[in-house]
Amino acid sequence: MTELYTETLDSPIGQIVIVYAGDKVCALDYADYTERTNQLLQRRYQKFQSRKVSRKSGVTKQLKAYLAGELDAIDTIAVDLGGTSFQQRVWTALRGIPSGTTRTYSEVATQLGTPRAYRTVDAANALNGIAIIVPCHRLVSANGALTGYAGGLERTEWLLRHEGCHV
């Protein structure tokens, strides 16, 4: 059984739950989406035990700095992505999108050398379990419209505006 640790952080967009496998973040979501988070963790680890900690890690400090406007503060947070090799490539590509900018699913697919796989990029993005740090909110449709974000479109809009994007 895998031992996971959680801590929480209050934020302007709701309480954030950070889940660690060892020293790396393996999930980050909003407290009102714990069922989704647990489903993703169960899919990945099958059996796990989660224990709350109040260590207020460096990750919490980095997230607070990001939320306070230091947008690159989250760029160095160590993550344990899991997923298939293609999903990992997508999630790594998302981390390469600079804050304050967006990319389309098609642009990411092309960047990965699979220009026709934009729907597969979309599917991988939907299974991203590490919100904000793996910035799935920076992906938009081909016409620039915001699309489904697991944390809600209001949060997507807030995050993009926070980063200086015109939504």
Image: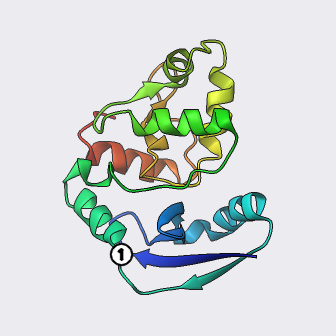
When asked about the image quadrant of residue 40, the answer is bottom right
Whole-percent x, y for residue 93 in the image: 47, 32
Amino acid at circle 1 = Ser
Q: Secondary structure at mark 1?
A: loop
Q: Which residue is at a point 42% across and 56% down the rendered structure image?
A: 78
Q: Is residue 146 left or right of residue 100?
A: right
Which one is nearer the viewer's eye here, 61 or 99? 61
- Badge 1: residue crowd in 10 Å (few <14, some 14–19, many ≥20): few
Which residue is rendered at x = 43% and y = 26% of the image? 103
Q: Is residue 161 above or below residue 44?
A: above
| Colour scheme of the picture | rainbow
User: Residue 39, image x and y in percent?
Assistant: 73, 63
Residue 7 vs 93, above or below: the answer is below
Q: Give coordinates of residue 62: x percent, y percent.
A: 28, 63
Find residue 118 and report its image quarter. Answer: top right
Q: Is residue 11 left or right of residue 89?
A: left
* Residue 80 in the image, given as x and y percentages of width and height: 55, 55
Furthest toward the front, the residue is 22
Seen at 59% across and 54% down, the residue is 129
Q: In the picture, residue 99 is in which quadrant?
A: top left
Q: Vertical placement of 134 versus 48: above or below?
A: above
Which quadrant, please, contains the C terminus? top left
The residue sitting at 23% across, 39% down in the picture is 164
Residue on which the image places disc 1: 57
Question: Which residue of the protein is positioned furthest toward the right in this rendering?
Answer: 46
The quadrant in which the N terminus is found is bottom right
